[in-house]
Image (spheres, rainbow, N blue to C red):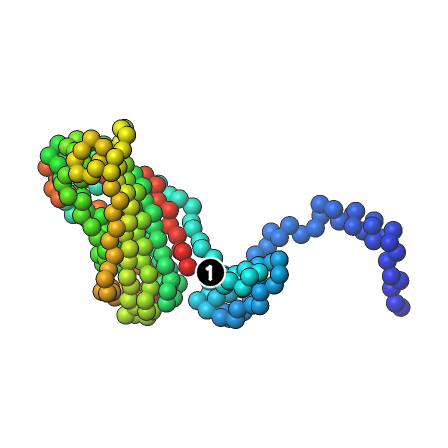
């Protein structure tokens, strides 16, 4: 027997009964599709979809297709480097098969340091799967002897090809500034030392297997332990940019 249609009054009563009882989207929702089909732009709304590498992506109302950037919560390594060999400042693991051509991963690390009583050089390096990629070395006069300083470095790796012989390039950039005084872009070992630094490959690549988990991070080393220089990582933020 057919069900009689709702009257307006019955519909209003049903809506009232459902208030505060409807689904709050607490369940897990998956984006459908095998990836690679870009939805048509729709006025006034963004379209979510799965990109060819399985990552979430979206299309703006104007038709701009972009990947969704992802970041994990910050963690607090507290790693102190006093040695003259590369030591970890902060790292995380890129899961096996996650990398796709053009994928970009980054870890941003910040912290504090003290130059030795005998000024020493300071090296920073991008590390991936036990390999040293881009690195740079600050000269011994980057900071006056015994000076305290603050620093921020971003280590980035980019996937060029995938597979057991996957290839990567990298970027290392950041800033180092004396602490506790006003700053001038004078560099060297002045009382106001501050500098921005950058390093990346020209054309070279590094082979690292994308089908296995790979530890990715930032490391540092002093030129010598003489004078007891010290560097400590305070905060690290892991990201997959695209």
Observer-nearest of 28 and 190: 190
Q: Quadrant of the C terminus?
A: bottom left
Q: Position of residue 111 (x, y in %)?
A: 29, 39
Q: Residue at horizontal 50%, vertical 63%?
A: 65
Tell me if residue 182 comes above or below residue 1 in the rendering: above
Q: Residues within 10 Å of mark 1 (few under 14, many from 20)?
A: some
Asked if one can make out residue 217 in the rendered structure from this viewpoint, the answer is no
Observer-nearest of 32 and 156: 156
Q: 8 left or right of 199? A: right
Asked if one can make out residue 146 in the rendered structure from this viewpoint, the answer is yes
Figure quadrant of residue 229: top left
Label 1, on which residue? 67
Observer-nearest of 99 and 148: 148
Figure quadrant of residue 228: top left
Q: Position of residue 161 (x, y in %)?
A: 32, 69
Q: Position of residue 135 (x, y in %)?
A: 21, 53
Tell me if residue 225 comes above or below residue 130 in the rendering: above
Q: Residue at horizontal 36%, vertical 56%?
A: 105
Q: What secondary structure is found at the residue carrying circle 1?
A: strand
Q: Residue at horizontal 81%, vertical 51%?
A: 14
Tell me if residue 85 comes above or below residue 99 in the rendering: above
Q: Position of residue 205 (x, y in %)?
A: 24, 65
Q: Quadrant of the N terminus?
A: bottom right
Q: 67 left or right of 24? A: left
């Amino acid at each position: 027997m057919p069900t009689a249609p709702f009257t307006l009054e019955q519909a209003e009563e049903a809506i009232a009964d459902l208030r505060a009882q409807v689904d709050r989207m607490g369940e897990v929702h998956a984006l459908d599709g095998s990836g690679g089909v870009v939805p048509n732009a729709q006025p006034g709304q963004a379209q979510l979809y799965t990109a060819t590498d399985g990552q979430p992506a979206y299309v703006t109302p104007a038709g701009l297709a972009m990947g969704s950037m992802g970041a994990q919560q910050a963690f607090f390594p507290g790693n102190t480097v006093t040695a003259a060999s590369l030591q970890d400042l902060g790292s995380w693991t890129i899961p096996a098969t996650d990398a796709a051509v053009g994928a970009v991963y980054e870890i941003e690390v910040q912290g504090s340091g003290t130059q030795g009583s005998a000024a020493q050089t300071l090296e920073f390096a991008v590390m991936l799967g036990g390999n040293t990629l881009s690195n740079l070395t600050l000269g011994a006069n980057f900071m006056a002897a015994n000076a305290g300083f603050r620093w921020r470095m971003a280590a980035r790796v980019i996937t060029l090809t995938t597979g057991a012989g996957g290839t990567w390039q990298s970027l290392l950039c950041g800033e180092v500034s004396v602490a506790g005084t006003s700053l001038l872009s004078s560099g060297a070992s002045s009382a106001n030392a501050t500098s921005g630094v950058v390093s990346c490959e020209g054309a070279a690549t590094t082979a690292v297997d994308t089908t296995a988990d790979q530890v990715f991070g930032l490391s540092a080393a002093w030129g010598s332990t003489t004078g007891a220089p010290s560097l400590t990582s305070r905060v690290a933020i892991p990201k997959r940019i695209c």
